[in-house]
Amino acid sequence: MLSRWLHIYLSMISFAIVFFFAVTGLTLNHAEKFNDQLKSTQETGKLAVSWVNAADTLKIAKLEIVEWLRSQHHIRAALSDFRIDDAQIGVSFKGPGFAADAFINRVSGTYDLTKTSAGLVGVINDLHKGRDTGAGWSLFIDISAILLSLVSLSGMVLMFFIKRKRVSGFLVSVLGLLMAYLVYVIWIK
């Protein structure tokens, strides 16, 4: 029977995904208990003045600045923002559980960099939300959602073929939906 085969094997493929999203659902729901993992460090440095002190902002060496900051400060996160104003340049990098922000003086080339790490729990929480994770992880979340939907649907289809458990199975499903609705109506709405 196709629905049984689908349900068994999709469930086995999805086990790690379900486990990951279940655990990270708990860590997200109780994030205040993991705030002590947040660590911030301050670093300073100096860039070539010619990179940052161009009269024409189009001539500012953006690529060189970004790659310098990456190599000197071991930053692997994606560039999220590059801002230029009259006095300074702001460069921000973001990744799961990580942020780095540099503020560069356009006259002297000196900069202050703040790196913030949220630890392992911060990383997995950002992975759960898909925040600052890139296109590859976004695709993984979409595939996970499709797999979990297929597991659920194949389980429901199986209930149609198990005569002794059909009524009780569907009653439990309705009870689950009703409980979720009541929690929403009573405590949220």
Image: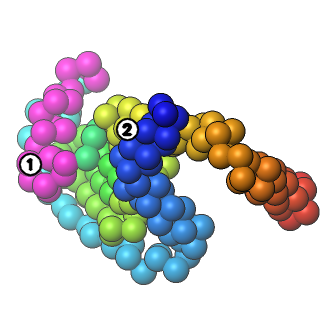
Crowding around mark 2 (Cα neighbors within 10 Å: few <14, some 14 to 19, many 20+) is few
Q: Secondary structure at mark 1?
A: helix
Secondary structure mostly seen in magenta is helix
Q: Reply yes or no: does residue 61 show up in magenta.
A: yes
Left or right position of 62 against 119: left
Name which of mark 2 and mark 1 comes first in the sequence: 1
Measuring 39% from the left and 72% from the top, which residue is drawn there?
38
The boundaries of the magenta stretch are: 56-76
Judging by the rendered image, the residue that carries numbered circle 2 is 140
Given the image, on which type of amino acid does mark 1 rest?
Ser
Judging by the rendered image, the residue that carries numbered circle 1 is 71
Given the image, on which type of amino acid does mark 2 rest?
Phe
Left or right position of 46 against 11: left
- Where residue 32 sits: x, y (%)? 55, 76
Q: CA distance from mark 2 to mark 1?
A: 29 Å
Crowding around mark 1 (Cα neighbors within 10 Å: few <14, some 14 to 19, many 20+) is few
